Image (cartoon, rainbow, N blue to C red):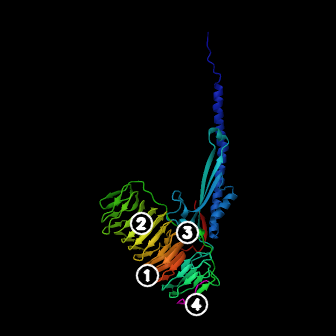
Amino acid sequence: MFKLNSEKGQAIIMIAFGIVALVGFTALAVDGGRVLSDRRHAQNAADTAALQAALSKIREENYVAKGLERAVSNGYDNDADSTVTVILCSSAPVSDPCTGLPTGANLGEYIRVKITSDIPMTFARVLGRQFVTNKVEAIARVQGSTSSGDFLVGAGMVSVRGDNANDCYKVLGNADLTFHDSGIFVNCTGSSALNFGGSADIYMDADAQVAASPNCTNDPSFNIDGPGEIACGAPHQTVDASTFAHIPTTLPTPTCSNPGSQVGTTMNPGYFNSNVSISNGTVFNPGTYCFNSSLNLGNSHVTFSGNGSVKWVLSSSVSLFGTANFGDSGDSLEIYTNGSDFTIQHGTLTADRFRFFGNGNSDFDVQGGTLTSGDAYIFSESGKIEIDAQADANLHAPPPGDTFDGILMHMPWSNTNSFELNGGTNNVWTGTILIPHSNVTYNGGSGFELHGQVIGYTFKINGGAEGDIYYESSPLLTPPDNPSIEFTK
């Protein structure tokens, strides 16, 4: 008997494979076409939203809301199928920074719009793919506004609190304060928003402008020395977080991919996973140092220096007792912290260029020490900046063209910690002290000079406080004369 090998059923297998292939090609053609179409549409929506946000920022409108509105009008909302974010690059999280910007770009000038959309699949579901996610972004650069800025009005001290409160600018006891080419501005509207102590001696070249009207001071007969007068009924300003949203805050924290080394008194950049102690005569070569454990800068007898541009990324609090010299031509020191503090504890720090980026709850303290830099920027996101009355601090804000042009010290609107302005004798600070949501206590001493402007929430000038305030427009943060918008990405 002969047995015949039957090939019945093989056709079914071939048909099944053919159907899978057909579905795959159909999915590629149909679903893939939908994905590409959505990506083009989402990119166009992001582009127009970025331009709308930039235009709204120039008009001093709520640019975030306007950008989101434009994205919604193009079919992208924060719903189950898509998400839209509009953010200044200066506020972008460290984990998701803006990329592709020019070197040294002022992050506060760039608005980023990101759109993420999920496209449900039809034929690709057969192959196990339920949806495909598109991610697009657009970045627009905006410079300037339709006004010259709310507070660049010749006021050496500006209180931005805007409700019907009293004592928003309060002078106690025998304070002796002199304002050169300057006055003050008080934004709150209580009948005693401006409170003068009877024995205070205040000289102003310009007026004390107060938003309250007709009564704005506890003592209308208080005698201001100089040509300045008490001027009630100044234009009231609307001040909130968006007022300062365009101003840059910090830079992305650098990272280290290779191990560093400590060879005698020579430090080479990289990461350090164990404790590091600095000895006398140590020199830091240029580069980024990531101290993943503790950094011990030694005692008061230890002197060390930097060679070029040095960056420290600190994971724990550090105190300086000795002498740090980053003041030779071209030397600089940048310190990055996240929840840890840096304290000059009766030590001395000199730098041609100095930056402190205190992310999270990070304090910057000078306790009886010396800090000198002709190009300095000090930032604390949610911690404190404290320079005590016994400290010697001679500081100048970054020059024009720098990301932080004109800003000397900065605690953003979200930081409501108090601030004590304790400039000591023969201290000179030049630049804007921008602490708009902080209650400021001024304890300046005789011989202290501030060249610039202090923007705070409220002010209390303690009895016995002295000093000279010089309003100078050159070191202040100012918008460009001609507003402009350009696409970057």
* Residue drawn 67% across the image and 61% down it: 69
The answer to whether mark 3 and mark 4 are in CB contact below 8 A is no
Kind of residue at badge 3 = Trp
The answer to whether mark 3 and mark 2 are in CB contact below 8 A is no
Magenta residues (range): 216-228
Q: Mark 2 = which residue?
A: 342
Q: Mark 1 = which residue?
A: 445
Q: Mark 3 = which residue?
A: 413
Q: Mark 4 = which residue?
A: 221
Residue 333 image position (x, y, % from top left): 41, 66
Of callouts 1 and 3, the N-terminal one: 3
Q: CA distance from mark 3 to mark 4?
A: 35 Å
Of callouts 4 and 1, the N-terminal one: 4
Q: CA distance from mark 4 to mark 1?
A: 27 Å
Query: Where 389 falls versus 297 (above or below)?
Result: below
Which numbered tag is attached to residue 410?
none
User: What is the quadrant of the C terminus in the image?
Assistant: bottom right
Of callouts 2 and 1, the N-terminal one: 2
Kind of residue at badge 2 = Phe
The answer to whether mark 4 and mark 1 are in CB contact below 8 A is no
Q: Secondary structure at mark 4?
A: loop
Kind of residue at badge 4 = Ser
Q: Secondary structure at mark 1?
A: loop
